[in-house]
Amino acid sequence: MTSRDASHDRTIRFSIGPDEIVIRRKYEVVSILNDVMVAAWFIVGSILFFSESTTTIGTWLFLLGSVQLLIRPVIRLARHVHLRRFASSAPDDSGPDF
């Protein structure tokens, strides 16, 4: 099957193993917390840009938020690896991508 065929595959698969559900939920929570923290760094950094005396710390918070944006794909990769190790065969990862 080519990658084009795979992207058009409309097969629905359900995997309802209790351990897999727990793994997915843990990674989802970590991903949500990461997203909230990224938003907080950018909001606070934006507010600090209103005053010249706090521009430097605002810049550092923007940098921190940008680095933390890299954490999201790392969380996704860790989840994929964890599920692959957990399953006897490669899991169908049709669930939400956190």
Image (tube, rainbow, N blue to C red):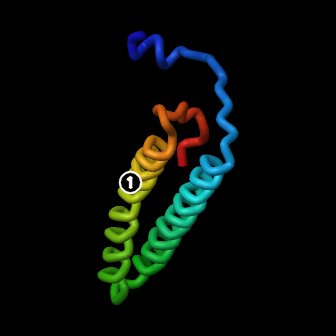
Reply above or below: 52 against 74.
below
Reply above or below: 98 against 15.
below
Where in the figure is residue 28, as x and y percent of width and height? 58, 55
Where in the figure is residue 73, as x and y percent of width and height? 40, 50
Where in the figure is residue 89, as x and y percent of width and height? 47, 32
Reply above or below: 85 against 4.
below
17 vs 59, nearest the viewer: 17
Residue at image position (43%, 80%) is 48
Residue at image position (49%, 19%) is 7
| Quarter of the figure with the N terminus | top left
Where in the figure is residue 82, as x and y percent of width and height? 45, 49
Residue at image position (48%, 77%) is 44
Local packing at callout 1 (Cα closer than 10 Å; few below 14, some 14-19, many 20+) is few
1 vs 52, nearest the viewer: 1
Q: Is residue 61 left or right of residue 11?
A: left
Q: How many marks?
A: 1
**Residue at the farthest bottom position:** 53
Query: Which residue lies under the disc numbered 1?
Result: 74
**Residue at the farthest front position:** 88
Q: Is residue 42 left or right of residue 52?
A: right
Amino acid bearing label 1: Val
Residue at image position (44%, 79%) is 50
- Dot 1 lies on which element? helix
